Amino acid sequence: MELLSQVNYWHWLALGLLLLCGELLGTAGYMLWTGIAAMLVGIVLAFIPISWQLQWISFGVFALALTWLWWRKQHRVDKQSDKQRSLNQKDKQLIGQTSVLEQDITRGKCRIKLGDTSWSAYSDSDLPSGTLVKVIDVDGITLLIEKAE
C-alpha cells in the first residue's frame, strides 16, 4: 500500500512510454490506448493531486473510453470501405453480367439462369425468350434485370 501511495506523475508517464514502446513490437493496438491512458493519468496527476485509488480508476476509465472511441471510428471506416469493395461479395460481382432468357418473362418476378445458378429476378417490362438481359442491381437475393443494349 505504501508503494501505491508514493506513485507520482513520472511513474505514470514512464508506464505510458513503456506501453507505447511495447506497441512498437507489434501488439496490434492492444497497448496503444492503455499507454495513452497512462500518460493522461500522469498529466492529470501533474496538475491535480489525486489518491492512488482514483489514479487507477482514472487509468481504467481513460483506457476503456479511448478504446471504445477508436473502435467506433474504425468500425465506421470499415463499413464504408466494405460498401466499395466487391471482393467476396457475390451480389456486387453479378452487376453488369448478361444472360440469355430461356423463357418468356412477364413484368414482375421471374427466374433466370446466370452462370451455373438459377436466380430470382425482377423485370420492369415483358421480355421474350432469347432476349439478352443485363443485371443492373441486386436487392437482397433478387436480381434486377433489363434488356441489354
Image: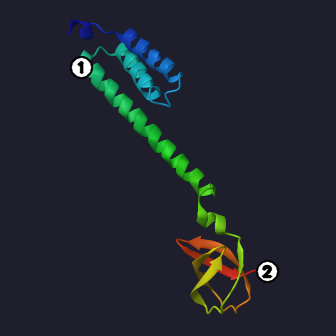
Say which residue appears at 41% left-offset and 15% top-offset.
15
At x 58% / y 77%, what residue is drawn? 119
Give the amino acid at mark 1.
Gln
Find residue 120 and report its horizontal and vertical position in percent. Answer: 56, 79
Q: Residue at x 45, y 44 (%)?
A: 72
* Within-10-Å neighbours for mark 2: few <14, some 14–19, many 20+: few
Question: Residue at 63% of width from left, 86% of height from top?
Answer: 124
Question: Residue 71: horizontal and vertical position, in percent?
Answer: 45, 41
Q: Position of residue 104 (x, y in %)?
A: 66, 93
Q: Which residue is mark 1?
A: 53
- Specify whether 140 is left or right of 39: right
Asked if residue 92 shows in the view, the reply is yes
Q: Which mark is residue 39?
A: none
Q: Nearer the viewer, residue 70 or 127?
A: 127
Mark yes or no: residue 51 visible: no
Q: Which quadrant is home to the N terminus?
A: top left
Reply above or below: 89 against 148.
above
Res 113 → quadrant = bottom right
Amino acid carrying mark 2 in the image: Glu
In the rendered view, tell whether residue 76 sits above or below residue 64.
below
Badge 1 marks a residue whose secondary structure is helix
Left or right of residue 4: residue 110: right
Measured as percent of width and height from the top left, residue 116 is found at 64, 74
Relative to 5, say whether 53 is above or below.
Answer: below
Residue 149: which disc?
A: 2
